[in-house]
Image: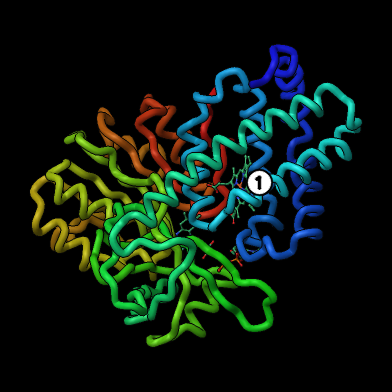
Amino acid sequence: MLSTDQMNAIKQSAPLLKAEGTKLVTVFYQNMIRQHPELLNQFNKTNLMNGSQPEALAATLYQAALHIDRLEELLPAVKQIAHKHVSVMVKKEQYPIVGYHLIEAMKEVFGLTEEDDTLLAWKAAYDIIANIFISIEAEMMDENIKQKGGWADVKPFIIKKKIQESPSLISFYLVPEDESELPMYEAGQYITVQADMPGEAYVCSRQYSISDQYHPSYYRITVKRDGHVSTFLHDEMEEGDVLHVSMPQGMFCLQEDTKEPVYLISAGSGVTPMIGLVKTASHNNQPFTMIHADRLEDVTAFEKEFESVLASSSHGRIILCNEQFEMSGKGELVEKAASRIDRPFLQSMIGEGKGQFYLCGSPAFTQEMIRILKEMGIPEQNIHFETFGGQSMKEIEVV
Ligand SMILES: Cc1cc2nc3c(=O)[nH]c(=O)nc-3n(C[C@H](O)[C@H](O)[C@H](O)COP(=O)(O)OP(=O)(O)OC[C@H]3O[C@@H](n4cnc5c(N)ncnc54)[C@H](O)[C@@H]3O)c2cc1C
Ligand code: HEM
């Protein structure tokens, strides 16, 4: 337990963390990866290089400093990070490595000495925070292994089917090599896929949402051609090839036990978790409105699948948006809107806005949607989101 003096020292360091946190964690990651390059098996190099991972950690440390006397308030955010940690196979033995390099970076960037009270307080606080993560993650890993057909770390899957959904979207149907039945997972969860790419010293890990409801024999993921790994999957991975994947993780799932209306709002590859979510809402008889925007050539990729969701549901709408549609209107069942997803459009779709909102897309898209929904008076606790890029407590205003 931290003493009152230690808590005060940490709270007093919050403004410094806010101002210099990104510099601190950038130095931290550079030194840690230099000494432990094997961590590149787990970290997404792009997120490290473009700063989104350092920013996510800096924001978490800042929030930890502010909440050091009431860390339980951070539990929902901690659980979300823990899902990601389990998915990328973070081990409890790795926490001292992170702790050591974080404290060393504090010395270097903040000019703290070994005997400094603030540094000693952060050393003690890091151990407490690390132990919270370690125990939550141990529980999650335990639950994974205990499930029938569950596994630890990664397991080999064969690409059974590869389907071009649109010019830039390809779906992969992944079947366990041992043909075992897949443990239950929730619509909206993601898996980590390890790509063993030629010329790379380490495997490249990326997360992909499962783009369907639970199916006992396969995971379907849908990958948008974007950069390094997605291009490799599109161009080099064929039916019959093997990919190593983690068990599904993530909290971007429909709230249980509610018949409240559900609003699903996505852009680009953010459509992927929405497919399982819209099917679940329909199956649960929850009123739903799904709004999805993408480039003209990609936006109708799942139109047929959406038509069949609507065909078996009397209380749902699915609207595909692209400014280049010649006109707004209704096809068989799916609606098309010649519009961006902006505030006037959302206002016309949402009305009073009673219900739960689920957002998915790039960090810029989710941030913009959160801003608009808050302006429209939607309570923060009714807004849920997943971003396909670095995600952090920066976007979750917990103070
Ligand atoms: C929970 C979760 C679920 C996800 N689900 C899906 C999904 O269902 N489908 C999906 O397609 N994706 C999904 N993603 C995103 C996915 O994990 C990858 O991030 C995505 O496929 C891009 O990886 P990549 O290796 O192809 O691109 P990267 O090489 O990592 O590049 C990513 C982007 O950064 C740009 N970039 C890279 N380097 C530079 C540079 N030096 N300068 C400027 N720009 C640069 C690239 O052009 C590209 O646009 C998900 C992410 C998360 C966190
Ligand atoms: C108390 C210590 C730690 C904190 C506060 C922390 C915080 C975070 C945060 C905020 C994220 C982003 C989560 C998201 O994208 O949703 C993250 C992701 C991650 N963390 Fe940690 N972490 C800690 C310890 C560790 C340890 C010990 C490891 C082991 C090497 C680790 C490895 C990773 C990896 C690989 C990712 C995914 C990054 C990516 O590829 O995008 N973390 N962590």
**Which residue corresponds to the image point at 74% horizontal and 36% vertical from the top-left?**
21
* The quadrant where residue 273 appears: bottom left
Residue 98 falls left or right of residue 381: right
**Which residue corresponds to the image point at 36% horizontal and 28% vertical from the top-left?**
378
Residue picked out by circle 1: 95
Residue 299 in the image: state x and y as whole percent.
35, 64
Q: Is residue 11 above or below residue 205?
A: above
Q: Tell me if mark 1 has few (under 14), some (14-19) or many (20+) residues whose alpha carbon lies within 10 angstroms of its own.
A: some
* Observer able to see residue 368: no
Residue 32 in the image: state x and y as whole percent.
77, 53
Instruction: Kindly identify the amino acid type of the residue bearing the numbered disc 1.
Output: Tyr
Residue 225 in the image: state x and y as whole percent.
50, 72
**Which residue corresponds to the image point at 44% horizontal and 40% vertical from the top-left?**
369
Query: Label 1 CB, ligand 2: below 8 Å?
Result: yes
Residue 159 falls left or right of residue 237: left
- Foreground pick, 179 / 8: 179
Residue 238 in the image: state x and y as whole percent.
43, 86
